[in-house]
């Protein structure tokens, strides 16, 4: 749900990217990956360390809890060129939107499939879709990034 609403919101906020997608629907998969990187639904996660780790000269001890800021990692300029730019044609977009390794989201494939079908359907059914006059409403959460309301117009 958050992936789809975040995608629609971002495309409407970036009309040049929406026009690019409308002109080339083969970009739908890279659009979904860019939404996951740029405005992922999960902002952070936590882990318990299984061994001591030294990071930037700081020793983190086995058994300590650490917060991993996925949203910050997905905007890391050492990893992504122009990280604050929403670019649906971005190449090499290995983000952490669904986690990684043994903590990779088990529902990732289904979420991508649902987003692909919904975005394709919206673009084909509503060629003049635009933002409504009321502002979007974001859920009050520090963990999740998603909308509770996204007013739209059919055009």
Image (cartoon, rainbow, N blue to C red):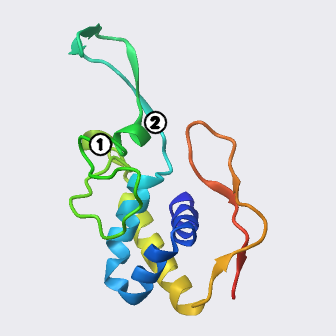
Instruction: Specify whether residue 107 is in view.
Output: no
Q: How many marks?
A: 2
For label 1, the crowd category at 10 Å Cα-Cα, with few meaning under 14, some 14 to 19 and many 20 or more, is: few
Residue farthest toward the right in the current orientation of the protein: 134
Find the distance from the CA under tag 1 to the CA under tag 2.
18 Å
The secondary element bearing badge 2 is classed as loop
Assign the C terminus to one quadrant of the image. bottom right
Residue found at x 33% / y 78%: 27
Kindly identify which residue carries mark 2.
44
The secondary element bearing badge 1 is classed as loop
Residue found at x 38% / y 58%: 108
- Residue 88 image-quadrant placement: bottom left
For label 2, the crowd category at 10 Å Cα-Cα, with few meaning under 14, some 14 to 19 and many 20 or more, is: some
Instruction: Specify whether residue 116 is in view.
Output: yes
Is the residue 151 above or below the residue 108 in the image?
Answer: below
Q: Nearer the viewer, residue 115 or 25?
A: 25
- Give the image location of residue 46, x and y in percent: 42, 28
Kindly identify which residue carries mark 1.
77
- Give the image location of residue 53, x and y in percent: 22, 14
Q: Is residue 18 left or right of residue 154?
A: left
Q: Nearer the viewer, residue 103 or 53?
A: 53
Q: Nearer the viewer, residue 53 or 75?
A: 75
Q: Which mark is residue 135?
A: none
- Give the image location of residue 107, x and y in percent: 41, 57
- Residue 1 image-quadrant placement: bottom right
**Lower sequence index among marks 1 and 2:** 2
Is the residue 103 above or below the residue 68 in the image?
Answer: below
């Amino acid at each position: 749900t958050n992936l789809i609403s975040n995608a629609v919101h971002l495309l409407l906020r970036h009309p040049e990217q929406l026009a690019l997608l409308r002109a080339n629907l083969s970009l739908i998969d890279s659009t979904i990956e860019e939404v996951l990187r740029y405005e992922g639904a999960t902002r952070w996660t936590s882990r318990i360390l299984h061994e001591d780790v030294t990071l930037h000269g700081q020793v983190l001890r086995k058994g300590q809890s650490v917060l991993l800021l996925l949203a910050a990692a997905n905007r890391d300029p050492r990893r992504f060129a122009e990280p604050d730019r929403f670019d649906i044609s971005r190449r090499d977009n290995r983000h952490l939107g669904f986690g990684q390794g043994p903590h990779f989201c088990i529902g990732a494939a289904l979420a991508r499939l649902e987003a692909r079908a919904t975005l394709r359907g919206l673009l084909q059914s509503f060629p003049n879709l635009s933002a409504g006059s009321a502002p979007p409403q974001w859920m009050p959460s520090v963990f999740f990034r998603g909308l509770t309301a996204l007013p739209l117009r059919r055009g």
